[in-house]
Image (spheres, helix red, strand yellow):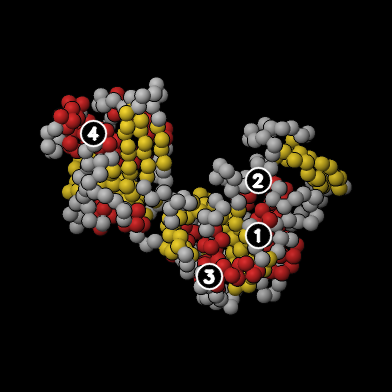
Amino acid sequence: MVKSTSQFVCQACGAIHSKWSGKCDDCGGWNTISEEAAVQTTPKGLTSGKGKKVEMVTLDANTQDAARTSTGIHELDRVLGGGLVAGSAVLIGGDPGIGKSTLLLQAVVAIGNKGVSCSYISGEESVAQVSLRAKRLGLTSPKVGLASATSVRDIIASIDGGDAPQVVIIDSIQTMYLDNLDAAPGTVSQVRAASHELIKLAKKRGITLFLVGHVTKDGQIAGPRVLEHMVDTVLYFEGERGHEFRILRAVKNRFGGTDEIGVFEMGGDGLREIANPSALFLSGREGSVSGACVFAGMEGSRPLLVEIQALVAPSYMSSPRRAVVGWDGGRLAMVLAVLETRCGIRFSDKEVYLSVAGGIRISEPAADMAVAAALLSALYDMPLPASSVMFGEIGLSGEIRAVSRTESRLREAEKLGFSSCYIPDQTGKNSVFKGLTLALKHVETVSTLARQLFGAVDKSAAQKKVGEYA
């Protein structure tokens, strides 16, 4: 029995309501609820009918690892976990104009030049527009087919044949629609149903499917949250419009890790891979400027050196301003509280500005010590040693805790020409780093850090004051 009804669906979170209202009770969004026609099917005698028996295997059964196909773009392969997996679905999201379509167009041409049949289906641009962009980027391949379509029924009929392509790119999923649903393209029901049909075909035919997804103003992929559960891999393409750097990050990956990043540089000829992102992020660094500190971080298995910049200015307001770019504002407040409470260094009457150079975002707590050093350097207008890096997590009692992957961080710093590194006191005392010539300076607390950084400099009034505070 098939019964047609109407329901009210939130276009932001997919919640279903019995009647229209101005605000969604689930996600709090305003004016996001719209009426959609729903088709409800109630099968008769489903529990009493006979179904097909599901074959079971044991966990210790011999299974083969998923075969992978390289995309020809090393940074993309790194984030995917080694390459493309047949029958997998990959969702890639990012801000408008960040380079999602450019990245996938470059990837599909690189794959096609290896003899793999590919299809690039655009719902936002015509075939002429995609061809014009490919010519501007110098991309061509006889194995790549271009099409402009938005009907899922037409797309499935085109690729579900004897000459089915091995890689299909849908740009974007918000423009696709099913003609048996009474809803506009981009709505929750259309995105969910269109994705389901395309992913089902990809699993059945062994096609690697790429879905481009729009993002909301909060940076989340638009449409129902279930879309991210349906696909095998979710990638986010990040970057600042004012910077040429782009970061490709995996937040879900059934065939690899979720802690890897790919670094690209956007230019006139498209996206260029960055093999050594540390050197790129430190390329414009000035060594004799106060408030700048180099942090040795980790992004997945890749060590990454970035510069953390701080500015401390007098404030005449009751609530001084705290501005952070590229780091957690709550963690900055914690570091300031530890410096003021445990070391007696006052920041409550100062405005504090903190930025991670290059447009990259740092999330690991190992950056605490570098942030504290940059703040002290900015407060007393004293440059830090230009050839030193640091990393370590600060606890609420003022101690500096050890972090993981110490040797990888140290070897990356040495490769880039740094001569010394400030590390937590618990790190490296019982470890032997073979072939490492980097001078290691162990730091126990933030007070010790202040003494080691400013104790060997000329004794001016400000430096004596730092010694008294520390």
Q: Which residue in the structure is indicated by mark 2?
A: 224
The nearer-to-camera label among 4 and 1 is 4
Inspect the image, locate mark 2, and give the three-letter code of the amino acid beneath it: Pro
Question: Element type at marker 4?
Answer: helix
User: Distance from label 3 to label 1 (Cα)?
Assistant: 18 Å
Q: Is residue 252 left or right of residue 303?
A: right
First-in-chain label (1 vs 2): 1
Mark 2, Cα crowd under 10 Å, few <14 / some 14-19 / many 20+, is many
The nearer-to-camera label among 2 and 3 is 3
Question: Element type at marker 3?
Answer: helix
Question: Element type at marker 2?
Answer: loop
Q: Position of residue 212 (x, y in %)?
A: 60, 57
Q: Position of residue 62 (x, y in %)?
A: 52, 62
Instruction: Tell me if label 1 and label 2 are in contact, CB under 8 Å.
Output: no
Inspect the image, locate mark 1, and give the three-letter code of the amino acid beneath it: Glu
User: Which label belongs to residue 124?
Assistant: 1
User: Distance from label 4 to label 2 (Cα)?
Assistant: 50 Å
The answer to whether residue 387 of the structure is visible from this angle is: yes
First-in-chain label (4 vs 2): 2
Q: Which residue in the structure is indicated by mark 3?
A: 136
Mark 4, Cα crowd under 10 Å, few <14 / some 14-19 / many 20+, is some
User: Which label belongs to residue 380?
Assistant: 4
User: Distance from label 2 to label 3 (Cα)?
Assistant: 35 Å
Q: Nearer the viewer, residue 124 or 111?
A: 124
Residue drawn at point x = 32 percent, y = 51 percent: 305
Q: Nearer the viewer, residue 55 or 239?
A: 239
